[in-house]
């Protein structure tokens, strides 16, 4: 079955003056065949060959194929820029010739040309068209039973709040990254690895950019040793250094850095000096 909004592996059924018609290998002359226009037809394509294409709808709402890969797939989240706003809604650049519509009813706040927004793309059952929504929270899963404290996860930042940033966890759940746990520049649209910090009784999830406790000390300690070896055995950092400088040098928080150098000091692998740390 051909799926709109996703990559499909189809067979070249017949060639015409406007391009190749594609479909399932046993669907010759089926009404479900879709056109791959000439501008996307590879020179080597022949009848009977398989080809992977993305299926969407053209300006007349007919299914059509392309060999271009869009920046978002159906039932996925992604940050996209607004290229125009009309009387029907905002249009996003998603990597295809026909821009992606966000109807006014699907905008969490009025969209502005030139700005990026995290959106969810879905197939509108009433119109058969692919549309996007910036009201992402209503597409997230409330059942967090698959998650456990300490899990490493993928985070997509989608909204700033007074407490920090709302994030999408593993393209499925909603989480909160607190300002107090951020040691690098963060903005909506950023993707980054993170960890489950706490799953509250109300099923809301707190996340962090670094793993809590001892699990994070050993790899961080090794990272510091590697940096020392690469810098002639010395780094101009210690427990009084600015957190931003520590992150710029080692990409870790000051809290993790202090735990790691404490471990290395106890193991007598480094000495802590007024102007930094050095290998023993």
Image (cartoon, rainbow, N blue to C red):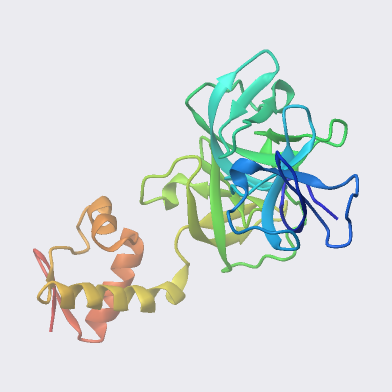
- Residue 172 appearing in the image: no
The C terminus, quarter of image: bottom left
Q: Residue furthest top?
A: 87
Across and down, in percent, residue 137 comes to 69, 41
Q: Nearer the viewer, residue 51 or 196?
A: 51
Residue 128 picture quarter:
top right
Looking at the rendered image, the quarter that the N terminus falls into is bottom right
Please tell me whether residue 88 is drawn above or below residue 95 in the rendered image: above
- Judged from this view, the residue extending furthest toward the bottom is 267
Image quadrant in which you'd find residue 276: bottom left
Residue closer to the observer: 229 or 74: 74
Direction from residue 276 to residue 242 in the image, left or right: right
Is residue 40 visible in the rendered image? The answer is yes
Q: Position of residue 251 (x, y in %)?
A: 32, 60
Residue visible at 29% across and 57% down? 247
Give me the residue at 30% from left, 79% from top.
222
Residue lying at the far front in this picture: please name it.
17
Q: Is residue 37 above or below residue 277?
A: above
Q: Nearer the viewer, residue 254 or 227?
A: 227
Residue 246, image x, y percentages: 25, 58
Residue sitting at x 71%, y 63%: 49
| Left or right: residue 30 compared with residue 180 | right
Q: Residue visible at 56% across and 21% down?
A: 84
Compare residues 93 and 109 and report the one nearer the observer.
93
Q: How many marks?
A: 0
Horizontal side of 182 relative to 174 (left or right) equals left
């Amino acid at each position: 079955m051909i799926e709109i909004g996703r990559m499909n592996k189809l067979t070249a059924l017949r060639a015409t003056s406007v391009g190749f018609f594609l479909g399932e290998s046993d669907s010759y002359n089926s009404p479900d065949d879709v056109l791959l226009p000439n501008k996307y037809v590879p020179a080597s394509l022949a009848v009977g060959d398989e080809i992977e294409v993305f299926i969407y709808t053209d300006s007349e709402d007919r299914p059509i194929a392309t060999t271009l890969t869009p920046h978002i797939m159906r039932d996925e989240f992604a940050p996209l820029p607004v290229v125009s706003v009309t009387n029907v809604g905002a249009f996003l650049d998603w990597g295809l010739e026909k821009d992606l519509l966000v109807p006014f009813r699907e905008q969490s706040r009025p969209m502005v040309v030139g700005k990026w927004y995290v959106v969810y793309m879905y197939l509108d059952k009433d119109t058969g068209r692919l549309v996007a929504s910036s009201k992402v929270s209503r597409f997230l899963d409330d059942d967090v039973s698959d998650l456990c404290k300490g899990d490493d996860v993928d985070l997509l930042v989608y909204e700033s709040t007074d407490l920090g940033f709302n994030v999408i966890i593993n393209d499925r759940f909603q989480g909160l990254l607190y300002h107090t746990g951020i040691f690098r520049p963060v903005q909506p649209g950023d993707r980054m690895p993170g960890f489950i910090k706490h799953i509250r009784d109300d099923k809301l999830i707190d996340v962090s950019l670094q793993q809590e406790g001892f699990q994070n000390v050993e790899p961080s300690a090794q990272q510091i040793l590697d940096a020392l070896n690469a810098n002639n055995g010395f780094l101009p950092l210690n427990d009084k250094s600015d957190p931003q400088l520590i992150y710029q040098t080692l990409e870790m928080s000051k809290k993790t850095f202090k735990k790691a150098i404490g471990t290395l000091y106890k193991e007598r692998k480094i000495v802590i000096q007024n102007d930094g740390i050095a290998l023993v």
